[in-house]
Amino acid sequence: MVLVMFRVIRNAIRYLGLDIKDVQTPEDILNAKRLIFPGVGAFASMMECFKTERDG
């Protein structure tokens, strides 16, 4: 189900004529003009990953 939702969101963004780049490195995040984060249910775990990477 989650992969289906990602596909729907990606298709909607492409339909609007925008480019999509998957984040692969911290630099991708820093260089992004905009970011789309996972839904509210996954936000806390995503932020924890950021903190872990940042703090070493």
Image (cartoon, rainbow, N blue to C red):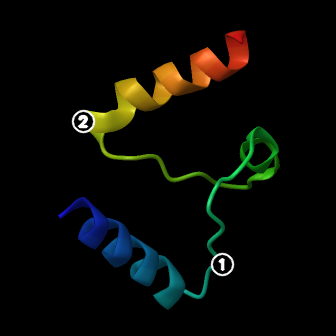
User: Circle 2 — which element?
Assistant: helix
Residue 34 placed where, x, y %?
Answer: 65, 54
Q: Is residue 11 above or below residue 1?
A: below
Please name whichever residue, 12 or 53, is drawn nearer the observer in this view of the structure.
53
Real-space Cα separation, disc 2 to disc 1, in angstroms = 26 Å
**In this rendering, position of residue 49 left or right of residue 32:** left
Where on the picture, by quarter, is residue 7?
Answer: bottom left
Where on the picture, by quarter, is residue 51?
Answer: top right
Residue at point 46% right, 46% down? 37
Residue 31 placed where, x, y %?
Answer: 82, 50
Amino acid type at circle 2 is Gly
Mark 1 Cα-neighbour bin, 10 Å: few <14, some 14–19, many ≥20? few
Amino acid type at circle 1 is Asp
Residue 32 placed where, x, y %?
Answer: 74, 53
**In this rendering, position of residue 47 left or right of residue 23:** left
Q: Is residue 52 above or below residue 1?
A: above
Q: Which residue is mark 2?
A: 41
Residue at point 71% right, 12% down? 56
Please name whichever residue, 46 or 37, is drawn nearer the observer in this view of the structure.
46
Q: Is residue 14 above or below residue 46?
A: below
Q: Which residue is mark 1?
A: 19
